[in-house]
Amino acid sequence: MLSAVERKIEQFIQDVDSVEVHTLYKKISKGKMLRARLIGQIAGKSLLSIKLASVVEMIHMASLLHDDVIDDTVVRRGKTSINATNGSKIAIMMGDILYSKAFFELNKIDSKVSSIISNAVISLSIGELNDVNLSANFHTDKSAYLKMIYQKTASLIEASAQASALLVNKNSLPYKQYGRNLGIAFQMMDDILDITSDEKTLGKPTFNDFSEGKVTLPYIYLYEALDECDKARLIALYKKPLNQSQKEWIKKSMFEHKIIQKAFLEAKILINEAVELMESCGEYSLSNIAKAMIEREF
Ligand code: FPP
Ligand code: MG
């Protein structure tokens, strides 16, 4: 499935008929293609499912090109990002081209599928807007964080699962719920790995979230657990580039207060629900994808 999707995206890029776009596309490293894998698993391998998966992966690629500009990030999936090599203007335009071509193709698939996916793109864009707004000041608003990660990350995964179920006339409800849980847990894991992993494994810098102003779940829990003096110490590090000893202090404090376990448990609850749901539908490959998600290291 995944190599067929890669070939289809390549063909869509060739259709655009621009050497520059093709050269830029070649510079973007392929990710885990989680959304395409889900679509293939739910809808099976057909021309329509390959097209849907290609469209969704192109939208996801476009959103990451824009996100790296917004977050001022220079490394993505182990490679220098497009905004760093070619500048933000080119990265934004390349995102727009991928996104527009994806929509051109999406339109030809099915009107219900098309409205589910386009609705998710509105949601992920609002999610990114909320991420930017929440990053303006230090906060400890867990429900705002959960809503934002649902919108920013889970909405497109949820829509991919729902739309691919519809494509093959399956009852889309359990797949939609599965995609939602998987997506929220995926972002929670992303936010945990920012603290616990290393740049080589992750393919992007670590300890970046707090410096970028993002107060993720582990930081919300850490703040709640610290005494007044350490609360002030944590706030003093907010939005600052962190040196080694500051990173060590955050790690040590998280360890002492069992913060990573607490955040991990939240993701695990969502994954367990997703696993049970898929096992009740006899979808063991999908439940295995969910189990692997919680064990991922990058
Ligand atoms: C990564 O978050 C960002 C997203 C999952 C979504 C970003 C969405 C947009 C920029 C809207 C795009 C709109 C269109 C129309 C294409 P992150 O910064 O937490 O993750 P990271 O650490 O991988 O960068
Ligand atoms: Mg980012």
Image (cartoon, grey):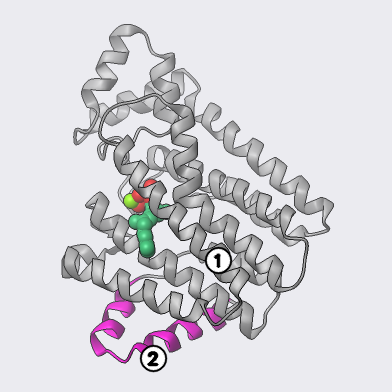
For disc 2, the neighbor class at 10 Å (few under 14, some 14 to 19, many from 20) is: few
Q: Specify the amino acid type for callout 1.
A: Ser
Q: Residue at x 58, y 33 (%)?
A: 266
The image quadrant of residue 195 is: top left
Q: Is mark 1 within 8 Å of ligand 1?
A: no
**Image height of 18 relative to 263, above or below:** below
Q: Is mark 2 within 8 Å of ligand 1?
A: no
Residue 36 vs residue 133: left or right? Answer: right
Residue 153 appears anywhere in the view: yes
Asked whether disc 2 touches disc 1, contact meaning CB atoms under 8 Å apart, the reply is: no
Residue 289 x/y as whole percent: 65, 56
Residue 77 appears anywhere in the view: no
Q: Which residue is mark 1?
A: 115
> Which is more N-terminal, label 1 or label 2?
2
Q: What secondary structure is found at the residue carrying circle 1?
A: helix
74 inside magenta stretch = no
Q: Residue at x 72, y 54 (%)?
A: 173
The image quadrant of residue 248 is: top left
**Image height of 226 relative to 173, above or below:** above
Q: Residue at x 49, y 49 (%)?
A: 297
Q: Which residue is mark 2?
A: 15
Q: Residue at x 31, y 69 (%)?
A: 95
Viewer-nearest residue: 3 or 220: 220
Q: Specify the amino acid type for callout 2.
A: Asp
Residue 31 x/y as whole percent: 44, 65
Q: Nearer the viewer, mark 2 or mark 1?
A: 1
Q: Which residues are magenta?
A: 2-28
